[in-house]
Image (cartoon, grey):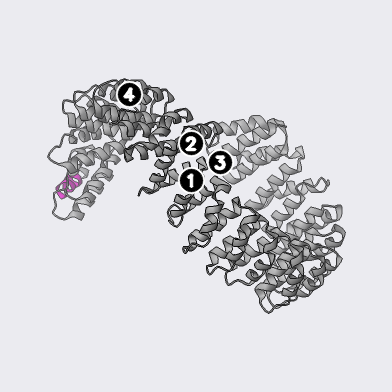
Amino acid sequence: MVTEHLQQLVQDFQHSDVEIRRKAAERAGSLKDSRGIAPLTQLLGDAVWRVRKTAIDALLEMDDKHEVIAHLVLALRSHENAGMRNASVEALTRMGAPAVPPLCRVVTDADPDVRKFAIDILGDIRSASAVAALIGALADADANVRTAAAENLGKIGQPRAVEPLLEVLSGDDFWLKFAAVDALGNLGDPQAVPPLLQHLHNESLTRAVLDALGRLADGGVLESVVPLIQHKKRTIRNAAVLAAGRILKRSEGGVDSNSLFQKETSEETLDGLIAALQEDALPLRQTALQLLGHLKSARCVPYILDILGDIDIHEQAVSALMQIGPATAPHLMDALDHPDELIRKAAAAVIGKVGDDTTSRQLVELLQDDNGHVRQSAALALANLNCSQAAPALLPLLNDPYPDVQAAAVQALQRIGDQSASATLMELLGHSSPSYRRNAALVLGALHTKDAVERLVFAVNDECPEVRKAAVVALGRIGGDRALEGLVFTLSDEITDVRLSAATALQHFNATAAKPILISLLKDEDIWVRCAAVQGLGEIGDAETVGVLIPRLDAEMPPVQIAILDALADNKDPRVFPVLLKALESADREVRRASMLALGRNGNRAAFGSLLYLLESADWSERNAAVEALGLLGDERAVPYLKEIVHHDPDPLIQKTARQAVVRLSRG
């Protein structure tokens, strides 16, 4: 029956309907009958790629891999049908390791095209066992085969290919040397650097050598690479720029590499980098900016400003200007009047990082710019410069049409800390604009303006919830008995966020005064308000709060239970440990995880056995929490168990957590 079915499917391989041919191939694969291998291989030559793809999938389903590989290797000889040959290449590549030994034998085939196909497939499979065959192919009689061997040795990446590839460099075959240079760059073995440097000034190989050095060399080669940034040939110049950038990036900006780069740089080098900024290739322009930033030369600033409006490299240009530092300031001050808002915005941001008091005046003027992004950037820059005289000009931005600008103005006024603005800010609490009222409250809180408390207490009854919330935050920061009285009014606010802010603000007050209020908030209808109240009570941590929190553990929802476990974790009250231990039995996974971590933080070594047992959990998150908890617990008995997990747990994240726990325990 199977034979008849297969015969019918093979007949369908010749059908004029594409979908019938494709489905026949699919069904033939599901039969796994080795008698279908030969006709399926022939189907790899079908004119329609969907049919060829299905035939590949069907062949890969077959159990007799050796037979499949043998037919696929034969198909590589199909010179008259490129589709069949290419499909065979794909199938052999996907076959992977089983195809390597037969392909290694084909590397010595009489047909050079077949030899090259075999080498390319072996390179894509990336099997170390193919390296010997490819090394032998470096001496093949056919130039294309030799070149393919070098290229694919670089793909496979085995160190034993380095020496044979270095030997190639002493030969006369240009294309083979070119491929060997690229392969040596991929292999990344530093012993290749001196031989590569010998070919650096062979202009036919210079670009390839620079690319390879960029991938494998350290800062020591910069003395050879940097001078080429001024080369008369732009292709070599650009390759040198990219190589120097990669070398510096790989050395992570090490002082020695940076110093050597700066030492080897001349005015002509700067010219080369500036010229690279004008190229079309984005990676090249980005690298040139990176290098110019390292050099910190004021001479290049106008050229960087010229491209600052290019959105593709805007961020790299800003970074370069910041690296150059104060030397950019005179040019940036002119850029504050540039017609492009992106340039004005960036200029203000950089001045905020590298400027001083002398640059503040124009930034203050920029607070009235027509563009919101520019106003925001100017406000943040003034904050960074701590410009005290900017406060009056910042105040109108508290009512800016754009929330981001308002936030920047709040941040600036808070950081500048100019108390002389307090009187105006208190007046703004009565302004008709909710934005003014909200932002004024936030700034007054940050300034700890005690004279504003009465007005802020009044503001907790504001019609706008955002104003009420800001007033609550401000009262929490200012503190005092009157501020606490004001917060009490908000505990029944209809808006959850206001009550939540009040619960959080209470943590800043005297424990004796705040405790009864926090306890009352445990009855709030919103779980997050209750969580905040629990957190505040945990900060107090006295016997009364422990007695209040423990009974609520069983009655609460999981998020609040987790907050209670966290609040009790560091408390050494003898009532706490049994409660944490019992929480391991919770039906909620997140509660169980929280209880494990709490037991670890609590430090009671009686938890060791329970945590050790949980290392066997089928749930990866529980195992991870148990591992972390054992690290926190501080019991050195856990070390051998944790080391076992490092070596044998199937989850890489848990292995990492176990390694960290072992280190923690080893440090005591």
Closer-to-camera residue (245/564): 245
Helix, strand or loop at disc 2?
helix
Q: Which residue is mark 4?
A: 165
Residue 653's disc number: 3
C-alpha separation, residue under disc 4 versus residue under disc 1? 43 Å
Helix, strand or loop at disc 4?
helix
| Residue name at image x 65 percent, y 41 percent | 628
Q: Amino acid at mark 1?
A: Arg
Percent of width and height locating residue 502: 75, 65
Closer-to-camera residue (326/243): 326
Q: Which residue is mark 1?
A: 299
C-alpha separation, residue under disc 1 versus residue under disc 2? 21 Å
Residue 303 is covered by the magenta coloring: no
Q: Which residue is mark 2?
A: 248
Q: Amino acid at mark 2?
A: Leu
Q: Is residue 663 left or right of residue 57?
A: right
Residue 520's disc number: none
Helix, strand or loop at disc 1?
helix
Residue 40 sits in quarter: top left
Q: Quadrant of the C terminus?
A: top right
| Residue name at image x 60 percent, y 55 percent | 352
- Going from N to C along the chain, the mark reached first, 2 or 3, is 2
Q: Quadrant of the N terminus?
A: top left
Which label sits in the foreground, 4 or 2? 2
Q: Is residue 198 above or below residue 1?
A: above
